Amino acid sequence: MEQILVAAATLPVSVLGPRAVLVNEGARTGKLYILKSGDLEVVRDGSTVAAIGDPGSVIGDMSALLDLPHSATVRTRNGAEVHVADDADAFLDAHPAAARHIARLLAARLHKTTALLVDMRRQAKVREDQVMFDKIFALLE
């Protein structure tokens, strides 16, 4: 994550207090956020799905790359500092190592998700469940 922090060093920093919202689920910002310090939680459909505390962690990557609304709300726990790239495309174009780092993170997420789906499909006892997994895998092609 060092290369992403180096690339982000010239970006403006936003300081957020405890329980502050960085991005709202369903909103569009077009921005990329890089955690400088602090701790964040990711909440989707009202459930906390992840904790983020490693400096250099990237928030908003899927939304920015796919030009989609944010899939989750990200908020601080006790406060945080984040670098803000207002134009994600320009930032990634200017910093190919950071773009490669994000690509690797996304590939790792897809790899883990696919492995989990394969395991769940293997355990499915009902034919309807197997059909559902077939549909999910078709979406990943």
Image: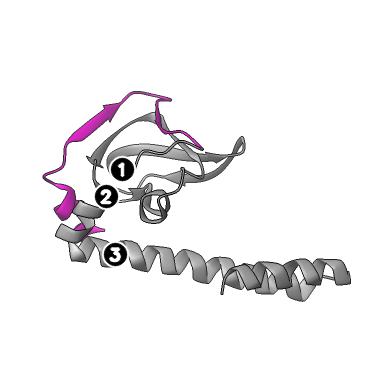
Residue lying farthest to the front in this orientation: 67
| Residue corresponding to mark 1 | 31
| 30 inside magenta stretch | no
Which amino acid type is shown beneath numbered disc 2? Answer: Ala
- Picture quarter containing residue 21? top left
Which amino acid type is shown beneath numbered disc 1? Answer: Lys
Upstream in the sequence, badge 1 or badge 2? 1
**Horizontal and vertical percent position of residue 65:** 37, 56
- In what quadrant of the picture does the C terminus appear? bottom right
- Picture quarter containing residue 33? top left
Residue at the image position 44 percent from the left and 68 percent from the top: 108
- The magenta-colored residue range is 1-25
Instruction: Specify the label residue 101 is tagged with.
Output: 3
Residue at the image position 50 percent from the left and 67 percent from the top: 110
Between 54 and 26, which is closer to the camera in this rendering?
26
Instruction: Specify the label residue 88 is tagged with.
Output: 2
- Picture quarter containing residue 105? bottom left
- Label 1 Cα neighbours within 10 Å, binned few <14 / some 14-19 / many ≥20: some
Upstream in the sequence, badge 3 or badge 1? 1
Of circles 3 and 1, the one toward us is: 1
**Horizontal and vertical percent position of residue 95:** 17, 60
Q: Secondary structure at mark 3?
A: helix
- Distance between the alpha carbons at the discs numbered 3 and 1: 17 Å
